[in-house]
Image: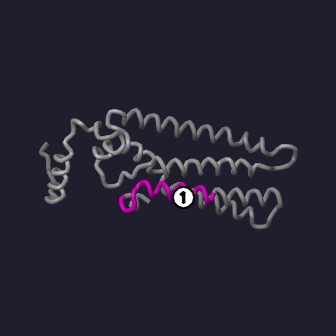
């Protein structure tokens, strides 16, 4: 997947990943409901397939790009703190899901009737909300330099002290010469 980042961009990969996760989770929920409510033949095998397919779509963007995207969109002075917060929230969500999901599944399986598929419905709605958030809030970071991203995200006044023309000239010079600079130790 890493080779696709520079070809297609980060935002499209997040959209494909999140949209795919939402669609797969909807079918996963449907197959779980059919299996638990009507004991539909093959629904249990479909659930296994959808678990696998969900992880495929998740790995398109969320497993690798989450950290790199956070680094790209945060201003330099906030990058370390922002990355720390991303990691704290990711670890908190993982911990919460690990310990709360079994309790939630038990809660949906009361009185001898298993309705735990309804928990998947909650997650489907959550992932749909993530898709809407990604669609409206994520900017594409493919192509522009970090300085240009700061201008795009924070506005032109954020770069009042940075000469973008000079940075662009240096990039053109580097790309034209393709020189490897060796440093003597």
At horizontal 65% and vertical 63% (from top left) the residue drawn is: 49
Quarter placement of the N terminus: bottom left
The outermost residue toward the front is: 156
At horizontal 33% and vertical 40% (from top left) the residue drawn is: 155
Q: Which residue is mark 1?
A: 57
Which span of residues is magenta-colored? 6-24
Instruction: Please say whether residue 20 is one of the residues in the magenta stretch.
Output: yes
Quarter placement of the C terminus: top left
Residue 85 % position (x, y): 46, 34
Q: Is residue 151 above or below residue 27?
A: above
The outermost residue toward the right is: 111
Q: Is residue 46 above or below residue 119?
A: below
Decide if residue 50 is on the left or right side of residue 63.
Answer: right
Would you identify the image quadrant in which residue 143 lies? bottom left
Decide if residue 185 is on the left or right side of residue 122.
Answer: left
Would you identify the image quadrant in which residue 35 lies? bottom right
Instruction: Please say whether residue 68 is one of the residues in the magenta stretch.
Output: no
At horizontal 44% and vertical 50% (from top left) the residue drawn is: 65
- How packed mark 1 is, by other alpha carbons closer than 10 Å (few <14, some 14-19, many 20 or more), is many
Residue 151 % position (x, y): 31, 43
Residue 84 % position (x, y): 44, 34
């Amino acid at each position: 997947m890493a080779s696709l980042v520079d070809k297609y961009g980060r935002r499209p990969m997040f959209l494909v990943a999140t949209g795919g996760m939402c669609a797969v989770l909807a079918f996963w929920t449907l197959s779980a409901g059919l299996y638990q409510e009507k004991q539909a033949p093959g629904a249990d095998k479909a659930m296994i397939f959808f678990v696998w397919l969900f992880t495929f779509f998740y790995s398109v963007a969320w497993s690798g790009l989450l950290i790199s995207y956070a680094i790209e969109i945060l201003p330099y002075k906030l990058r370390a703190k922002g990355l720390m917060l991303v990691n704290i929230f990711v670890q908190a969500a993982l911990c919460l899901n690990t310990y709360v999901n079994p309790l939630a599944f038990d809660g949906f399986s009361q009185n001898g009737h298993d309705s735990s598929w309804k928990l998947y419905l909650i997650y489907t709605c959550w992932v749909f909300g993530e898709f809407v958030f990604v669609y409206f809030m994520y900017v594409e970071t493919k192509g522009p330099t970090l300085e240009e991203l700061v201008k795009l995200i924070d506005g032109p006044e954020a770069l009042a002290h940075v000469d973008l023309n000079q940075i662009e000239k240096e990039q053109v010079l580097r790309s034209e010469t393709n020189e490897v600079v060796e440093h003597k130790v």
